[in-house]
Amino acid sequence: MSLDPTRQRQVQELASLWGAPPGWRSLSAVNHTVVGIRFMVTAFVFFLIGGVLAMLIRAQLAMPGNDFVGPEVYSQLFTMHGTVMMFLFAIPVIEGFAIYMLPKMLGARDLAFPRLSAFAYWCYLFGGIIVVGSLLVGMAPDTGWFMYTPLSSSAYTPGINADVWLIGVTFVEVSAVAAGVEFMATILKVRTAGMALNRMPILAWYLWVTAAMMVIGFPPLILGSILLEIERAFDWPFFDPTRGGDPLLWQHLFWLFGHPEVYIIFLPAAGIISTILPVMAGRPLVGYTWIVCSIVALGFISFGLWVHHMFTVGIPHLALGFFSAASLLVVLPTSVQFFAWLATLLKGRPRMDLPMLFVYGFFFTFVIGGLTGVMVAVVPFDWQVHDTHFVVAHFHYVLIGGQIFPALAAAYYWLPHFTGRTASRTVGVIVFWLILVGFTVTFLPMHLTGLLGMPRRVYTYAPDVGWTWLNLTSSIGGFIMAIGFALFILDVVLQIRTGRRTARNPWNAETLEWAMPLPPPTYNIGSLPWVKSRTPVHDDPQLEDDLQAGRGLLATPRNGWRETLVVSMLDGKPEQVLLLPGPTWVPLYTAIAAAVFFGGLLAKTYLLSLLGLAAVLVCALMWVWDGGLKRDPGPLDIGCGATAVPHPAAAMPPSLWGLVFLLAANGTLFASLVFGYLFLWVVAPNWPPPVFVPVDWASPLVTLTGLGLGFAGVLRAAQVNRQGRDLGRQAWLLLASLGGLIAAAGFTVVPAMLAPPVQDHAYAAVNAFAGAYMAVHAVLAVVFTGHAFARGRAGWLSAVRAVEVRAAVIWWSYTAGTGLVTLAVIHLLPRMAGS
Amino acid sequence: MLAGSVLILAGIMGTALYALRRNRRGHGVSERAMLIGGGVLFPFVTLFALMVWSLVGERLAAEDDPSLFQLEARGHQFWWEFTYPDVGGAPLYGAGEALIPAGEPLLVALESQDVIHSFWVPRLAGKMDAIPGRTNLMRLSADAPGTYAGQCAEFCGNQHLNMRFIVHALPAAELAARLEALAATAPDPALPGAADFAEHCAACHSVDPRQRGGPGPNLAALALRSQLGGGAPYAGADDLRRWLLDHPDIKPGSRKPPTTVNHDTLDRIITYLESTRP
């Protein structure tokens, strides 16, 4: 296909507009293609590190009484294997995949917040380096990947090992929450025209539910890690039963995250199956609506099962029954998907291309993992096999079956997309059989090892207990699997170097990521399509040519802007033109500042941490200062006779949706805190505390006044701004800032003078923590309001350009709401308890 | 459960592989029938049956019942302390091995001294955690007299492995006699090793079956046990000597400090502790 010279020039302009600078300056790139590939490659490197750890574990267990490594090293090996695979591979690889793929599938040119995904990448990289670096110095976490306290408390793990986990993993989780917010806002708003919700590729639904689960699922663990780190560093007794804490609180917070985590890993993989399988079967997916309903249901149910990891801690009969039932119920949405896949296969004409081989491998392994999962959901059976190698075998079937096989299917399916070349079928088939056979030889006998009574996490075993040949078999299988992965790497390298150039859309696929030249140019698509069905590429074989020739939306670059579309949530009508930022160092600087903060915590030099925190704030302010318009814009022509306003003049641009989803994550953290407060009060030993917060109405009244002043102030500021009264808006913003300062003081200064000492009892500690949480939010409310004020002074605001004012209103709503709850919990609860 | 699982696996894989055949039926299969029948009804019915079976038959959570035989099991890094709350009107302390009645249920009260442990005797019952700050009750019963191996089942630190224990199930009459005898068993205080033990060991270990003692296990009836340090075999003085000299290698990471006394003292202490051997 050849383009006419005018179009040629436009395409060149698009390419340079969206391109990243060359050389080392490309580290400032924020484009989703670059960041997504970085994410995936980094995740794969961590996967290899985790794999080497697994090999060391299998080497140690191959023979009874082996002294290849001692117990200290072995504890680090299995802790780090779990931590690296779960936190540094399984989740980030999904993030990387989604960052790369989502805009391409949605017909967009980038994600809603490119700088945020770049920031997420750096947080992930730095956090991962902290975690893995500890291995090199022999101080890696060694208390198991779920870090049960009190084993992980400073009394039993005095070294830095547990701090590495708590701080490094939290750093990585910041990245996960950022990515989750990014995906939620992108999928709902940043699609191409005409892509109504029911026309989205099925993978987008899967990724949206996954992102929502990340946003809701990670905060309980983040809270748990913060509390445990505070306990370790400053002796606030959240988990110490002798002082009113409870080790079970950690288990609840951990599994409140930990169970949804399994589905966070599985859902994108299932989405990959739902994308690849219909293409290979040559017909559209059976039961699109059914699948959408079942993944949404799965998202909800998965938050109701965390207690099934705790069946042996002494749970009342009725609760056991409830959580056991919920654990079985979660099978339903999964089986709906399986039967939809089977029906698609039966009704189509499936061909056994390379990706399909791995899809069948997924069927075989994951069904076994699911069935053993049903077994362990049955309480009496679980009491027997819990914490044995049976469970180890079960979750490797679920995780490797449920993620690695789909990921390999995805790799072989989409590699032509990354490289523009085709894979060698022969090598791929050998890779498949090596991994499948190696996997089965490793983990199928391990079920039996567990049933014969071998517990998890023992560094060796005696020759006379009958586990020898089973363990040896597993070790041999593990090494076969490792050879398979080595061959996979070789295969990918060969494909990149020597593979045949592929035709476009080599699989005859249906979705928009194939409607672009391969490998994709920096701007993804020459122009955005107006989508009329769920299978746009299938409907119109000429689509790629048309789009490249500019017969679509936003075909012509203007003003040097990076533009993509924002559509209405339900029906995909074009609403706004999103103006995206180009390469910038701010995300990297922000992540470095955050690394200084976390590094200071790790080294227990808290002054450094404070400096890091201040630097984060400065970077964040630089970040949000960028962009915007100084004059009220008119509607822009987007092509095909349609117009849309630039996003700074829209009522609800994606950034505000991002803020709403971020606050949803924050709200989950707050809800977990209130849950923890009540849990300790009701369940923990050694309650009631020796002293309650004294009856004092002055401090809550001061705080309430501050909250009320701030909230009313921003509301009024937004109102007068709509009337175009700039001066009035500025005055009300100032007043609201004052309210924030009063509230911050009310949450810290007064209670700090009156409250009982925090190290004496968990009650005092949790009160102080809640107060500090609210004080931080009040201070940030001042920052939000002050930012709006400064933007107003500099002329970025008007009656239509009011994003910063609205952001302040949203932040203040959250702060006032959670502030009221906090005041009620701190001051009313002890009165109600009758003390 | 296994047979059903194999059947389901075969059904799914069979269907998926059948779909690959060139000449076959199935193109006319009703989507709705597959989704409702296979995706919803089939798992719902099977799982509901499984659920009822698992919850109705079993008594999952134990309740306090003073009529049953009582045993307290307390997890320490890395050994189990067993206390019989009432033997002749006072508690009796022991470690590493527990005596229980055969043919009748008993209640085990699980507690922890430090981190979370889990009490597991595979042939008698499932497992239950011992959590600091709370007491979990577990009901178990040994149908026949015999010796049963047990181990800690929740990772509790580097020597989680060597936190094994032994449970002896005895007929009721024999059990009562054995417990009475244990309450009167202690090393001979007339031996010269008694003074050495008092000087070097007594800060951690008690040799009085009626006294709990310091942070280490009670050693009153040590020579009647068949293993040392939660796993090492124990048949006589040689095993005890090897344990005392080499335990940092046998059980690296255990809380027991290395033995520093000279050979003669060690001999006297071993003779003293061995004096309860019949």
Image: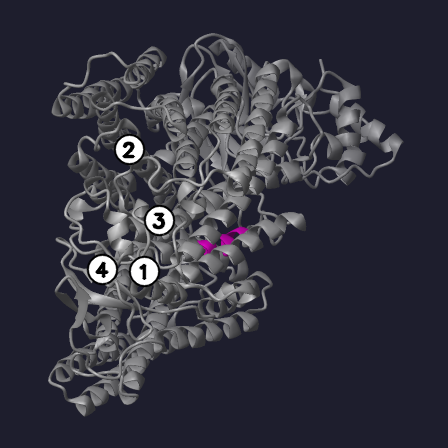
Could you tell me which chain the residue with mark 2 belongs to? A
Per the image, the residue denoted by label 3 is: A101
Residue at image coords 39%, 70% = A755
Could you tell me which chain the residue with mark 3 belongs to? A
Q: Is residue A241 above or below residue A625?
A: above
Q: Residues within 10 Å of mark 4 (few under 14, many from 20)?
A: few
Could you tell me which chain the residue with mark 4 belongs to? A
The percent coordinates of residue B254 (x first, y second) are 67, 37
Q: Viewer-nearest of labels 3 and 2?
A: 2
In the image, the segment drawn in magenta is A165-173
Q: Viewer-nearest of labels 1 and 2?
A: 2
| Residue A662 belongs to the span the image colors magenta | no
> What amino acid is found at the position of numbered circle 1 in the picture?
Asn
Q: Find the distance from the CA under tag 1 to the CA under tag 4.
A: 28 Å
Left or right of A358: which side holds A279?
A: left
Q: Earlier in the sequence, mark 3 or mark 4?
A: 3
Q: Earlier in the sequence, mark 3 or mark 2?
A: 3
Q: Earlier in the sequence, mark 1 or mark 4?
A: 1
Per the image, the residue denoted by label 2 is: A279
Q: Residues within 10 Å of mark 2 (few under 14, many from 20)?
A: many
Same chain for the residues under marks 1 and 4 in the image: yes
Same chain for the residues under marks 1 and 2 in the image: yes
Per the image, the residue denoted by label 1 is: A666
The percent coordinates of residue A271 (x first, y second) are 30, 38
The percent coordinates of residue A714 (x first, y second) are 20, 79
Q: Find the distance from the CA under tag 1 to the CA under tag 3.
A: 27 Å
> What amino acid is found at the position of numbered circle 3 in the picture?
Met
Left or right of A467: which side holds A778?
A: left
Per the image, the residue denoted by label 4 is: A832
Residue at image coords 38%, 78% = A749
> Residue B205 or A792: which is nearer the viewer?
A792
